[in-house]
Amino acid sequence: MGFTLIELTVVLAVIVTLALVLTPSIANSINEARIARARNDCQTIASGIYQFYRDTGIFPVWRVSRNGGAGAPADRLQVLVSQGRVPFEDVASLWTTGVAGSLADQLVTNAPGYALRSPASQFGWNGPYFSSQLTADPWGHRYAVNAALVDLSPGAATADGQAKMAVWVLSAGPNGIIETPFAASILTAVRPGGDDIGTRIQ
């Protein structure tokens, strides 16, 4: 038994209507899931950095470790990054142009050669700090940490009395453009800029 042209037209109209109604909802759910994953990844990276600091007493910013600890000033990295494409920026900053080091080198493989924790030593690298390699954010861009601004002195002020700068674990978010300033006071940097997703660690 065949279908008439009118019946086929009605069925197709219903299918098209359902597709038009459901597509935005599905797309919105996918985008929300990506944002949630990026937020969780940023928190996981921040947690790994905190644990690294508790174990070693230093921040993971050295290209080469000297005597198993902090490196020379020339070996200090400005930004730590995961795998992924370099995001865009309206105005170039150290987020994309700074001396970059791999988060995985610091927190997964100990490529700089930090001293290892041992029964005889209270401090030392005790990783890996992640169960797997760090991948790109859900939009294919790298996560980044503006590590050059870390100040481990106590309190909210630097040695010269100025407010410390905010340090972020950051994803450029859905638009792939970093809209968070690289250097912003902790007094004003309460959240990332634009649609960036991040966790502040200082």
Image: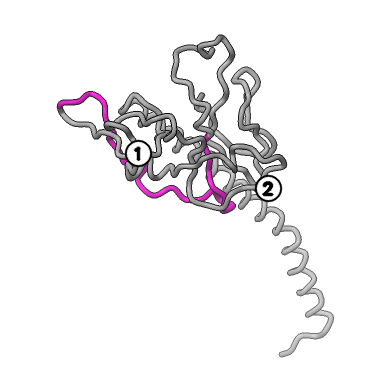
Q: On the picture, is 12 further left or further right than 167?
A: right
State the image coordinates of residue 39 (x, y, percent, origin top left). Answer: 54, 39
State the image coordinates of residue 21 (x, y, percent, origin top left). Answer: 74, 58
State the image coordinates of residue 89 (x, y, percent, origin top left). Answer: 68, 43
* Magenta residue span: 120-145
Vertical placement of residue 21 versus 188, above or below? below
Going by the picture, which residue comes out furthest to the right?
Answer: 6
Q: Residues within 10 Å of mark 2 (few under 14, many from 20)?
A: few
Going by the picture, which residue comes out furthest to the left?
Answer: 120
Q: Are marks 2 and 1 in contact (CB under 8 Å)?
A: no
State the image coordinates of residue 125 (x, y, percent, origin top left). Answer: 29, 34
Residue plotted at (76% across, 85% down):
3
Res. 6 image quadrant: bottom right
Examine the structure image and report whether residue 133 is included in the region drawn in magenta: yes
Label 1: element kind:
loop
Give the prevailing secondary structure in the magenta stretch: loop
Which of the numbered marks, if any, corresponds to residue 175?
2
Going by the picture, which residue comes out furthest to the top?
Answer: 161
Camera-nearest residue between 2 and 134 = 134
Q: On the picture, is 8 further left or further right than 187?
A: right
Camera-nearest residue between 148 and 33 = 148
Q: Give the amino acid type for the residue marked by disc 2 in the picture.
A: Asn
Vertical placement of residue 54 versus 114, above or below? above
Which of the numbered marks, if any, corresponds to residue 181?
none
Residue assigned mark 1: 129
Residue plotted at (68% across, 37% down):
179
Examine the structure image and report whether residue 142 is included in the region drawn in magenta: yes
Q: Residues within 10 Å of mark 1 (few under 14, many from 20)?
A: many
Label 2: element kind:
loop
Q: CA distance from mark 2 to mark 1?
A: 29 Å
Q: Give the amino acid type for the residue marked by disc 1 in the picture.
A: Tyr
